[in-house]
Amino acid sequence: MSDPQSPDLGPDRSLLLVDDDEIFLKRLARAMERRGFEPQTATSVAGGKALAMSAPPAYAVIDLRLEDGNGLDVVEALRERRPDARIVVLTGYGAIATAVAAVKIGATDYLSKPADAEEVVNALLNRTGDVLPAPPENPMSADRVRWEHIQRVFEQCDRNVSETARRLSMHRRTLQRILAKRSPR
């Protein structure tokens, strides 16, 4: 664990936490405070944007799906006010297409829930090192890789089904059926 006076954080230790799961939010706020951060919390897109605009923090951990909208709206607002902010997008709906969208908008990293405080700190401070991670125990199936690729192209085409189908050389109805199904394992 980091020392509260850790030079890793720098002089500005402000942290914005945005999540609609209030229990998780309070627990993460306490854990981050013990690690030297000065957290402010919000449970909605509106609250997160208000805090991002009034006092842009040096660090942020933002849930992707909130009750009143998309956490990427908070990422954009914060990035406008403070381009140097280190932002981690946290979500229970891990998909490569969403991760790509989050990083393109300005997130520093992307973590799937459940993530513990140490993983969040490592992502915020970019303590991943140059060592390649071990190969996954359960790699994605070929069907899942295909589905992720389709989702990525769909996101890049601004969720336009016709344009996505054209780029993938696929019939539009076939693509609609694939998009309507749940992701394969």
Image (cartoon, rainbow, N blue to C red):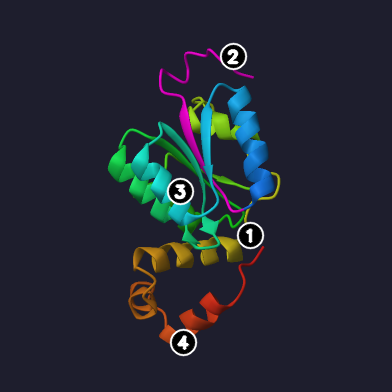
Pick the front one: 178 or 93 = 93
Residue tagged 1: 141
| Callout 3 crowding tier (Cα within 10 Å): few <14, some 14–19, many ≥20 | many
What's the mark number on residue 48? 3
In the rendered view, tell whether residue 34 sits above or below residue 171.
above
Earlier residue among tags 4 and 2:
2
Whether the magenta-drawn stretch holds residue 12 is answered as yes
The magenta span reads 1-20
Foreground: disc 1 or disc 2 = 2
Whether the magenta-drawn stretch holds residue 52 is answered as no
Q: Cα distance, mark 4 to mark 2?
A: 56 Å
* Residue type, numbered disc 1: Ser
Earlier residue among tags 1 and 2:
2
Q: Cα distance, mark 2 to mark 3?
A: 27 Å
Q: Residue 73's spot in the image, x, y percent? A: 40, 55
Residue tagged 4: 173
- The residue at 47%/38% (across/down) is 60
Q: Secondary structure at mark 3?
A: helix
